[in-house]
Amino acid sequence: MTRTYIAGIDEIPRHLNLWDNDELNINIVVRPGYTGDVNMEIDLLREGVKLDMAGIFLCSSAERINMNFTVRHLIGGCTSRQLFKGVVGGKSKVRFNGLVYVDKDAQGTKAYQECHTLLLDDSARMETSPQLEIYADDVECSHGATTGFLNQDEQFYMRSRGIPEKEAKYLQMISFLSPVMDRLNERQRKFILDNL
Amino acid sequence: MELIRITDLHAGIEGKEILKGINLTIGEGEVHAIMGPNGAGKSTLSAVLTGRPGYEVTGGTVEYKGRNLLEMTPEERSWAGIFMSFQYPIEIPGVSITAFMKAAVNAHRKAQGKSELSPAEYLKLLKTNMKLVQMKGEFAGRDVNVGFSGGEKKRGEIFQMAMLDPSLCILDETDSGLDVDALKIVSDGVNALRGPEKSALVITHYKRLLELIVPDKVHVLKDGRIVRSGGTELVEQIENEGYDSIHD
């Protein structure tokens, strides 16, 4: 099952219990112009369930976004994957708190979390704090976060083919966001492309 | 007719002078080769000619088709017909060859005051040029340079070159990392694009590329200067006696 939430349009559930689906895909889109909190807490309660979560956040001017995601593995043998990608420009400030909690009974857990951000301007701010809290010993967990600017070599390569700077940057953003974009349907993808 | 005239060019990176007074003129239809040991300034020269950010020109001029090349942005140089085959082509995940080249071709057409190609016209151009470098159909749908072998990357560069139909092709160590078969495909591609209005600057360490793309003139670059210019006999001399045998 796949659920897509667009912050500011759809109501994002604050808490989800995952005990009746084998697999749940959650997509979260934060579009330019949205200021506020995006909070979500998901408990994995049935053995073997899989949670696959992806998010895109786009800010272009002076948005303030506070994202808090908690995934709790309360039973063994579950897998959770989280991939967040964002483009932050202007004077926007974004905070991302991601917590993966693995209970002492949740043996055989696999949990992965990543958050990558592209800053478009020196005045844009990103604070990422990925956290793992693990109380079981048989687990496979990883988390990673990167924040950086548009790759200059990539940009030069495109411009040297005659692609104007502005369009090159647009293509770079598409390239950066593509792992998350690939998960969305065509209407949602268009929504993001129109908002870049 | 003269295509590009480089006069007393000084340039470097991070405050270090690498090019120390380059003089080089390439006429229309001519193929020039630049050979030189590591660190001679070969890649700096191609970077400066294509406007790579980070390189600083501290003296001299470059006149291209009667214009001041050094004042032009990288994309303006591309529109004016300069193309460089990168030594290390860049990977762009999530952007297909088709989308990438469409953006490039249409930007060129816009700069020339022409309308965009129709999907059918673009497809035809794509297919013709893929054939030139023996690329299969699925190539067009792949992400730019992602997961390409060394040979595929270089063939990809020649494909892009053919798509953009440049006046001056700069081949920056295109032969590095290529096996004999890939080298043959690449050089056949380049030779097929030679013509009375097409010029090339072939930068290389090795003789083998210049046996396949035969240059009109050969220049030896050492420590930021062209120390000798001549014909293909210079290639032989370097092969037999090394760069140490060539002085001012």
Image (tube, coloured by chain):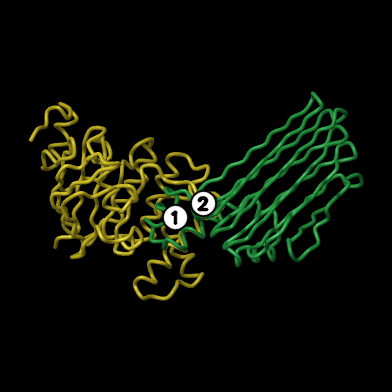
**Marked residue chain, label 2:** B
The residue at 70%/40% (across/down) is A113
Relative to B213, A123 lies left or right: right
Calculate the distance from the C-alpha at mark 2 to the C-alpha at mark 1.
8 Å
- Which quadrant of the view contains residue A51? top right
The residue at 41%/67% (across/down) is B107
- Which quadrant of the view contains residue A45? top right
> Is disc 2 placed on a helix, strand or loop?
helix
Residue that extends furthest to the left in the rendered view of this protein: B248
Q: In the picture, which chain is green? A: A
Q: Quadrant of the C terminus of chain A?
A: bottom right
Q: In the picture, which chain is yellow? A: B
Disc 1: which residue: B130
**Marked residue chain, label 1:** B
> Is disc 1 placed on a helix, strand or loop?
helix
Q: Position of residue B47 (x, y in %)?
A: 30, 48
The residue at 85%/43% (across/down) is A43
Disc 2: which residue: B139
Same chain letter for marks 2 and 1? yes
Relative to B222, B81 lies left or right: right
Work out whether residue A145 or residue B47 is closer to the camera in this orientation and state it. Answer: A145
Relative to B49, B133 lies left or right: right
Relative to A93, B74 lies left or right: left
Q: Please determine whether, in this image, residue A151 is positioned above or below residue A90.
A: above
Q: Position of residue B131 (x, y in %)?
A: 43, 54
If you read the primary sequence from the N terminus, does the residue marked by circle 2 or circle 1 appear first?
Answer: 1
**CB atoms at circles 2 and 1 under 8 Å apart?**
yes
Q: Position of residue A63 (x, y in %)?
A: 63, 60
The residue type indicated by label 1 comes to Met
